[in-house]
Amino acid sequence: MRHLPPISLLLALAPSSVAQTPISGTNIPGFGALQATVAENTPETLLELPPGFKYTVVIRNGAAMSDGNLSPSNADGMGAFQNGNLIRLLRNHERGNGTPLGNAALAYDTLAGGGMTTLDVDPETRLLANSFVSLGGTIRNCAGGVTPWGTWITCEETNLFNAGTQKQHGYSFEVSASANAQVDGNLARRPFLGLLYPEAVAIDPETGIAYITMDTTPSGLFRFVPQQYGRLDLPGRLQMLAIEGAPNFNTATSSVLNVKLPVRWVDVSSPTDEVSYRQNRLVAYNEGAAQGGASIARGEGAWYARNTVYFASTSGGAIGAGQIFALHLKNNDVQALELLFESTDREILDAPDNLCVTPGGNNLILCEDGSGAEYLHLLRRSGNQIYRLAKNIVPGQEGSEWAGAVFSPDGRTLFANLQGPGITFAIWPADGRWGTINN
């Protein structure tokens, strides 16, 4: 057995707990200052971008889709896949009670207004080629995650069950990227991932283990260990993260930058006890905490890259403005949790939400969901530096959150949503060079 140094010693030996942060608004290295930019396919000026960057409005709230439905509001998390010669986006809609999207006969709950749409985008023009409702009858589809087997996991950020719904909500649902029409919501439900108030999922492609964030305070980081690779519809083992040698570790106030804390996992026995979850949404967290599980302040976006799961703690840190963590899955056979970045000023970063990894696997794109101006940020792993990549200047919607940032499979285009106006954007450098954004 490997003997690990005490957590107190690891933290004491840390060089500093202060992030190396450039002054707010510093340009991305190699790029100029953000400037108001007109869309390529409309006469509107909706974003500020670095010089030489372009964007299109792929679709917006209320636009007619190919299946005859109108594009729903509250666009949120997204996954990107290759669909022949097109880029396919599977897009969440964080909506509550109401009329179900698409075909009510396929809805999970006919009193729930959330769900998903699928968008096919031309990779050259960055214009919409096809669109349709792909899941209906769910609630508050916030983030989720892509899988190595070509599906998108969409998470209901809730534990809702009341007179306004027919069924229990707070589940995760799995939709194939190859589905060319709306799927049956009941068949897509994946109950064994737990009623966790789930936010996002990141899958380790080697093991098929699903790492799940929980958007509450307090919350924990969970993982679902499947009994068969790629089968999230079958029972498995649900566990919560704990820090070895530090029971009930509070990541929001105790983590120190760039210190790798050894991880263990504790079992959660009742992931789908609907009666218990209706009474207390923290059932899974409380069971894990009773065994020493670590506490996180609102776990949100998550993404896998290079043997690491990155995730956001939206309210973490000394001032509650947000933290970014890396869970290293292979570190001499010992998993480790590392704080990569902590905001020390809300002008620098305020409430990171969805996130994704750049195509090279080196850096992170962060979606901001705070107050005031809203940005897409670039977090460069080298030196833990954060910069502004895009600013929302949609008239009357300047405070709307960014969501669903994801790169196309070929790495040429960054897609992202603004939730308030319900706009999906395609963003790219005119010369095709992402430069220091990707390396």
Image (cartoon, helix red, strand yellow):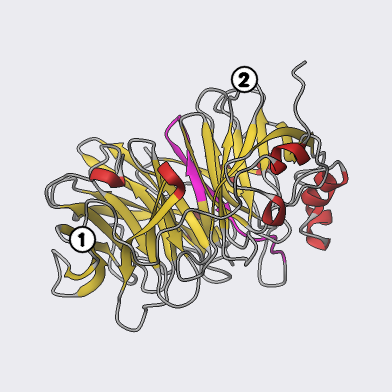
Position of the C terminus, as image quadrant, is top left
**Residue at (46%, 48%) from the top-left corner?**
384
Image position of 227 (left or right of 428): right
Mark 1 = which residue?
32
What kind of residue is marked 2? Asn
Residue at (64%, 42%) from the top-left corner?
Answer: 14
* Observer able to see residue 102: no
Q: Residues within 10 Å of mark 2 (few under 14, many from 20)?
A: few
Q: Along the polypeptide, which appears first: circle 2 or circle 1?
A: 1
Which quadrant does the N terminus fall into? Answer: top right
**Percent of width and height locating residue 74:** 44, 68
* Range of residues picked out in magenta: 144-161
Dot 2 and dot 1 residues touching (CB under 8 Å): no
Does 333 appear above or below 374? above
- Determine which residue is flagged by label 2: 332
Rendered location of residue 80, percent (x, y): 35, 44
